[in-house]
Image (cartoon, rainbow, N blue to C red):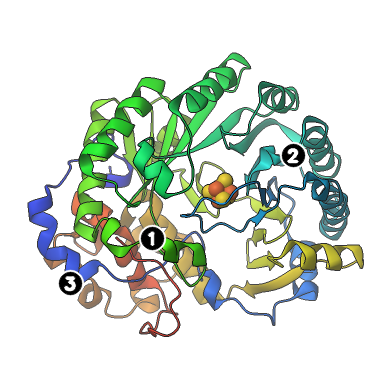
Amino acid sequence: MTQAQSDSFEIPDLESLRRLIPKYERPGPRYTSYPTAPVWNEEFGEDSFREALGRAQNRPLSLYIHIPFCERLCSFCACNREINRDHSIAGPYLDALELEAERIAEAIGGERRCIQLAVGGGTPTYLSVPELARMCRIADAHFPPHPDAERSIEIDPRVTTREQLSVLAEHGFNRVSLGVQDMSPKVQRAINRVQPAEQTERVTREARELGFRSVNFDLIYGLPFQTRESFDDTLNQVIDMRPDRIALYSYAHVTWISKQQRGFEKKDLPSAERKLEIFLHANKRLSQAGYLFFGLDHFALPEDELSLAARTGDLRRNFMGYTTKASVDLIGLGASAISELRDSYAQSFRRRTEWEERIRAGRLATMRGWSLSEDDLRRKWLIQRLMCQGEISTAAYEDAFGEPLSARIPSLAEKLAPLVEDGLLAASGEDYELTPTGRLFLRPVAMTFDAYLSEPEPSRPMFSSTL
Ligand code: SF4
């Protein structure tokens, strides 16, 4: 049983990690895709995407709908969002979404059952009750739901009403993911997101009353003014509310993407060591409270599907984070949305106006993308295996691709030797397993398999820090 599948995670102590921090704290991808988005280019445009859709096999698909609107800007945010208090923009956005759904369904051809629907943003509940109902009708008309479909939506507790949750439940939504981040009033003021615990509690309670079978909380560590002690208070409140899943993300300080983050004073942000300390403490508290840790940053109660998938080796990673839906094509609808097909990625124009313009002109709104080569597919598989199962298995690789791993990654043992020496990987013959320490430095380990990484140019930063 590998570390990523195991039920218990032996938490390393900070002292033993201290010497590794300077070595492994560097910019690096989160690997929600491989190759990562900065590699994609505009040569893969609308025509390439249409062709890729036509080649998509006849298997269930996963649908992601992006609703980019928010009323207020949280200053830590690096999502693709549009701050706008004028809700009249939502109707035309849904008009364009309908055209896009129709066009993509047509390009795929045949009937594709939707096994997973995820709605994210932005703030999906920026939409009114009738608009949410319309969004569901659009999805279902073009991508009929599979009887076992998982349907989830991101919820901002500050703006979500019971009526909105109710219409979502009526349309088959069974999972909600609440943006919580941190419950300390001081941290909340610093990130411009004041959200009293009662709001989070109310939405959690109402979602359960309405029959949602899973509630996820998104938390962030590394925010301004956070300390181990302050985050402990947040954890107390979170554990009391007992969400089924918790995603504990590392704050990404990416000021070249999110200019408002420049408002944070460096002295107020926890150092890499303090961040690690907060993460280790959270890990301990959550494990004492019965949560299992898997992947890079996810926790779930043992009976949750993600925990089960981690144990059976069925965990996968895509743009929505960790998922149980292996081998499905992911179709993204809306501005900036990303589609992931077996052999390609495609991303739509990020700005809502540009996206709408192309859709209204009868086109697909592909801004950039990538066709995966055979080498990409094999390295993607290796990175997935590492991030989801915590192992590098030469036999499993050979089974999957009919070639020895050494043919793909020459001198693998030499490349991995420093990671073994630093205690991030444990070697067993030609195979490797992530150690508990390695799970904390998972992004740098995965970078070993990335063929596109070059020395970072300080003038052109691309990735957040791996710690
Ligand atoms: S964190 Fe969420 S609610 Fe806040 S600005 Fe970003 S997308 Fe909007």
Q: Kindly report the distance in space between the C-alpha atoms of the residues bearing marks 1 and 3.
A: 39 Å
Q: Position of residue 363 (x, y in %)?
A: 87, 68
Q: In the image shown, does 237 or 452 lie closer to the viewer?
A: 237
Q: Secondary structure at mark 3?
A: helix
Can residue 420 be seen from the camera position used here?
Answer: yes
Q: In the image, which is nearer the foreground, mark 2 or mark 1?
A: 1
The answer to the question of whether label 1 and label 3 lie on touching residues, with beta carbons closer than 8 A, is no
Amino acid type shown at disc 1 = Phe
Residues at marks 2 and 1 touching, judged by CB atoms closer than 8 Å: no
Vertical comparison of 177 with 385: above or below: above
Residue at the spot of label 3: 417
Q: Position of residue 116 (x, y in %)?
A: 65, 40
**Does the image show residue 326?**
no
Q: Earlier in the sequence, mark 2 or mark 1?
A: 2
For mark 1, what is the residue? 264
Which type of secondary structure does the marked residue at label 2 adopt? loop
Q: Is mark 2 within 8 Å of ligand 1?
A: no
Disc on the earlier residue, 1 or 3 = 1
Q: Residues within 10 Å of mark 3 (few under 14, many from 20)?
A: some
> Callout 1: 10 Å neighbours few (<14), some, many (20+)?
some
- Taking depth in this image into account, of 448 and 221 the one nearest to the observer is 221
Tell me if label 3 and label 2 are in contact, CB under 8 Å.
no
Q: Which mark is residue 127?
A: 2
Tell me the crowding category of disc 2: few under 14, some 14 to 19, or many 20 or more residues within 10 angstroms, Cα based.
Answer: many
User: Where residue 271 appears, x then y in whole percent?
Assistant: 23, 59
Q: Amino acid at mark 3?
A: Ala
Work out how far the residue at label 2 is from the one at label 1, CA to CA, in angstroms. 30 Å
Residue 262, horizontal then vertical, whole percent: 43, 66
For mark 1, give the secondary structure: loop
Q: Single out the residue that lies furthest toward the left.
A: 15
* Horizontal relation, residue 262 to residue 127: left or right: left
